[in-house]
Image (cartoon, rainbow, N blue to C red):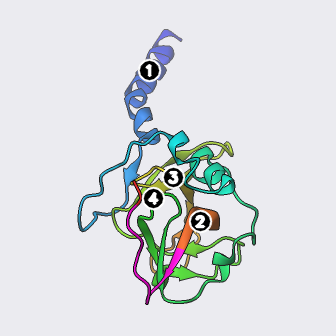
Amino acid sequence: MKRRILLQSLAVAAVFPLIPACFRAQVIGEASSPITPLNKPHEAWRGLVSLKAYKILFEEETERPESSNLVYEDREGTFICAACYLPLFESSSKYESNTGWPSFTQPIAGHIATKLDFKMIKPRTEYHCVRCGGHQGHVFNDGPPPRGERWCNNGTALKFVPKDEQLPTLRS
């Protein structure tokens, strides 16, 4: 019995140092130029975005499905963070997932960071804007080929800039 307890303790001790890595954000891809995080307190964004956007971006709420017209946006352009205006997705990666939220096959490299989320008990991969830390949505492994990823975004956490318009200056 003592041997079994010793072996179980050793197994737990071996895994224990790996647990914090599950909660650390990981940047997806490498940006063409490094993105400097703003490290701005969430409260500072309250006056810069709508109350609904603030709750989604900085309190990690989720909007109701079909509540954003970005679900149906099909023009060429760029989807940017609603808080700091960092480009997050190109329209070429958007597809109709029939979930009620804007969905993408991949983000712009280096502009998104992921971490594990246990709010629904079962772990999910949550993602945020790498610049302001604003919550965008979750990534699932049920998307179309070849990557098989569905980046399911809250429409309120994004703004759309058509191809023929200039991207707004990054907000700090």
Disc 4 element: loop
Circle 3: residue type: Gly
The residue lying toward the viewer, choosing from 24 and 18, is 24
Judge from the rendering whether residue 6 lies leftward or rightward of residue 67; answer left or right. left
Q: Earlier in the sequence, mark 3 or mark 2?
A: 3
Examine the structure image and report whether residue 91 is included in the region drawn in magenta.
no
Start-end of magenta stretch = 160-170
Identify the residue position indicated by label 4 in the image: 84
Q: Residue at x 33, y 62 (%)?
A: 110
Q: Quadrant of residue 30?
A: bottom left
Real-space Cα separation, disc 2 to disc 4, in angstroms: 16 Å
Identify the residue position indicated by label 2 in the image: 153
Q: Is 124 situated above or below 119?
A: below
Between label 3 and label 4, give the one nearer the viewer.
Answer: 4
Judge from the rendering whether residue 128 lies leftward or rightward of residue 98; answer left or right. left
Identify the residue position indicated by label 1 in the image: 7
Real-space Cα separation, disc 1 to disc 3, in angstroms: 43 Å
Circle 2: residue type: Asn
Q: Residue at x 39, y 42 (%)?
A: 39
Q: Count neighbours of disc 1 (C-alpha within 10 A) and say few if under 14, some if 14 to 19, many if 20 or more.
A: few
Q: Earlier in the sequence, mark 2 or mark 4?
A: 4
Q: Count neighbours of disc 3 (C-alpha within 10 A) and say few if under 14, some if 14 to 19, many if 20 or more.
A: many
Judge from the rendering whether residue 46 lies leftward or rightward of residue 166; answer left or right. right
